[in-house]
Amino acid sequence: MDLDSGAVVLCTSGSSGQPKQIRKRWRQLAAEIEALEALWHWSKPLAGSAGESLRPVCVLGSVSPQHMYGLPFRLLWPLCSGRLVARRQLVYPEALQHASLPHADFVWIASPALLKRLGTSLDHAALRGGLRQIVSSGGPLPGEISDMLARDLGCRPCEIYGSSETGAVAWRQGDTAWQPLPGAEVGVPAGIDGAAAADAAGNPPPQTLWIRSPWLMPGETFQSNDAVQLTADGFRLLGRMDRIVKIEEKRIALPAVEQALALHPYVNEARVDLVAGEQRLSALIALTAQGIHALRNGGRAALAQALRAHLAPTQEALAVPRHLRFVRELPWNAQGKLSRADFERALARPRWPREIASAPTQDAGCTVEPALPAHASRVPSATTTGVESVDAPPEARRYQLEIPLDLRQFDGHFATTPVVPGVAQIDWAMNLARRDLSTELTFCGADALKFQRLIRPGDQIDLALRWEPAKGRLYFEFRAGDQPCSSGRILTQARHDPA
């Protein structure tokens, strides 16, 4: 292959704006792959063999090969080094484990988003024997996740620092300094007068990292936006300069606010930023199990006040976010990025439950047609109030729903114990029926209403709907497992009282 005659065009993630096109020649990609191979050898000798007889590992991944991390690590490097390549992108922990176990030796090319979801559901004993390495890139990997994987799987992840423009630049394991890859050079601009450029508080300006390597264009020095502190064997990241904002002439480092929030036992991770057109900080906060418990049993206002009080001793008043939104997980994409658009979209408190996708099922006497939405299935039999027929007609539907932690309807219902109002439950049933049963349904009243169990933040519930067109009645029932929560009959036609 002529390394100088071809190239690929990739796009940046677009996490801080519009994606940019990046052109990479084959020679640049080959130089990066050679540096990776010089640093890591994932094969090991076959039993009873000598010399160069090696057993190749299988490389599996959760990231797309259409980006600058996945392309060399998941595709080009394994191909060039004669390793096995798992073609499917494995975005769920269970799928990654299932695909790994048939191989004697394997490597995971993953994002922090996936590694944070591994939890305790994996078969650690089965995976430990074959897992040669875990590679993570796309964002910071929390130290506790690195420690957990080292403890449970006997394999501490190797983090990769780089970008679409630079490719891989440096690596580390655990809370150590970043070490440049073989052939890569890093440094900070020389000749900056720190005293002259200090801010009003006397703090010197952060210094940003420059990068040179054989997989950049010849003679090119890339100037990053990452503030760093150089060490004897590499560098430590201090945050991105483009994530420093000014509010009322105060310079606020957003990563520092996020790190301070993450120190609270209620917070798993947080993202803080300015929303377009506003001069106050907003925070998207993923809660721990302890944080969810506090929200369910103390209410939103108390939780927000506790987090603001936690920040007050270490942060400027302007650095304490005024708008807080609570979620189970931050909306990282498959590349481990959280774009500004996704951040701003996630800040809006929802009015609707989240529909949990489920595979279509087939029951005796009731086949789910392909045209049905993936989140809805027909109700095969009657085990709930209001769903009466043995063979459910096409007008019956079943849904799995998750109640958001920060549902808008919790406001005022109630301040210290959030509960889904009954009127909201009726509204959800009516709107799903309009979407999936008949767009012409109108609400003309409700009767036979029963509210037996509270529906709370984070609950997973089932909803059964059945519509009887001839009688103009829509039956609904919400259940949590085998416990009924609410049920009733919605009238879709006006009643005509006898004269």
Image (spheres, rainbow, N blue to C red):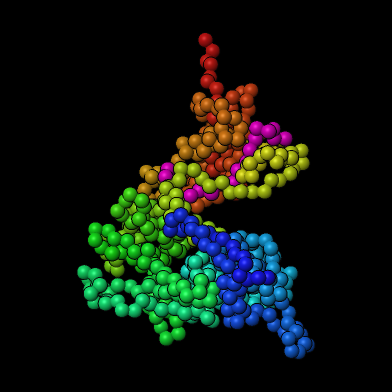
In the picture, measured across the screen, residue 417 lies left or right of residue 401, that is left
Res. 446 visible in picture: yes
Q: Out of 209 and 390, give the one closest to the viewer.
A: 209
Place residue 195 in its image quadrant: bottom left
Query: Front-most of 151 and 450?
Result: 151
Q: Position of residue 158 (x, y in %)?
A: 55, 75
Q: Is residue 236 magenta?
A: no
Q: Is residue 360 above or below residue 334?
A: above
User: Which residue corresponds to the image point at 42% horizontal and 51% vertical from the top-left?
Assistant: 344
Residue lying farthest top?
Answer: 499
Q: 170 or 259, which is in the foreground?
A: 170
Above or below, comparing residue 370 to residue 73 in the picture = above
Question: Does the image show residue 128?
Answer: no
Residue 332 x, y percent position in the rendering: 50, 59
Q: Residue at x 39, y 80 (%)?
A: 230
Residue that protrudes farthest toward the left in the picture: 200
Q: Residue at x 67, y 48 (%)?
A: 359
Name the outermost residue toward the right. Answer: 48
Asked if residue 395 is among those painted magenta in the image, a careful observer would answer yes
Which x, y percent locates residue 433?
A: 57, 34
In the rendered view, tell whether residue 319 sits above or below residue 448. below
Residue occupying image coordinates x 49% and y 43%? 352
Is the N terminus in the top left, top right, bottom left or bottom right quadrant?
bottom right
Q: Is residue 437 above or below residue 225?
A: above
In this view, which residue lies farthest toward the front? 5
**Left or right side of 422 for 108:** right
Nearer the observer, 400 or 419: 400
Q: Which residues are magenta?
A: 391-409
- Horizontal relation, residue 43 to residue 169: left or right: right
